[in-house]
Amino acid sequence: MIVKHYQTGPLEVNTYAIIDEKTKKAALIDVGGWIKNIVEDLKKDGVTVEFILNTHGHFDHILGEKEAQDLFNLPVYIHKNDIPLVERIDEQTLMWDMPVAEEPEITGTFEDGDEIELGDLKIKVLHVPGHTPGGVGFYCENTLFSGDSLFYHSIGRTDLPLGNHQDLIKSVKEKFLTLPDDTRVLPGHDRETTIGFEKENNEFFK
């Protein structure tokens, strides 16, 4: 597996491309914008984007996905519990004093424990409600794409609509912190970390 990182959108979302080395197929995680630049960059290496996976439905993580569908006809997937957030992307952007955005069309949904195939790779879905009701992480080859649920020395906000602090602590403990200590953690914002480091140093889990 190859992982490429792009910082996208007005809130500097970490967008990731998961690439299967054998087939050169890729999945994008959380497209906050600038889809043309991402696709063009991947094409230089002969990589084809197959679909988009979302860790959750907050506007900054899905802001570039309508354009991705319009330009490249890319399928978009999200946990079913976050569809209401996607449908209210216009309300979300207005709340942050940003221009109204058009929602992407959700192609399909996934559930906790699902395994999504990408070439020879299998991406496991880990449902971690709390930051949003349908928040998930994606686990593949000892790498966790944690969205806005787990950060370096921190966790995601739960003061936004539909957030729940107790749910987030519980679900991260049960689904993320049980992974191997050397698991690489790639979050939705900021820098990467590891499961072992967060177990030892994250004040939210002391």
Image (cartoon, rainbow, N blue to C red):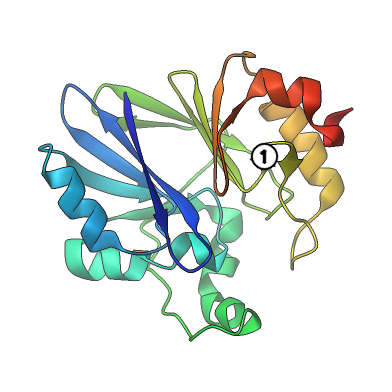
Residue 78 appears left or right of 153 = left
Identify the residue at horizontal 20%, vertical 53% (top origin).
39
Placement of the N terminus among the 4 image quadrants: top left
* Residue type, numbered disc 1: Leu
Identify the residue at horizontal 29%, vertical 70% (top origin).
67
Seen from this angle, which residue lies furthest front?
191
Residue 170 appears left or right of 98 = right
Residue 16 appears left or right of 98 = left
Mark 1 crowd level (few <14, some 14–19, many ≥20, 10 Å Cα): many
89 in relation to 127, above or below: below
Image position, residue 20 (x, y; %)? 25, 27
Q: For residue 178, say whether it is visible.
A: no
Decide which of 80, 94 is in the foreground and name it: 94
97 in relation to 60, above or below: below
170 in relation to 33, above or below: above
Image position, residue 59 (x, y; %)? 53, 68
Residue under pointer 1: 150
Find numbered disc 1 in the image and state the secondary structure of the residue it sits on.
strand
Identify the residue at horizontal 77%, vertical 44% (top origin).
168
Residue 45 appears left or right of 136 = left
Image position, residue 143 (x, y; %)? 49, 25
Image position, residue 118 (x, y; %)? 29, 32
Identify the residue at horizontal 75%, vertical 66% (top origin).
160
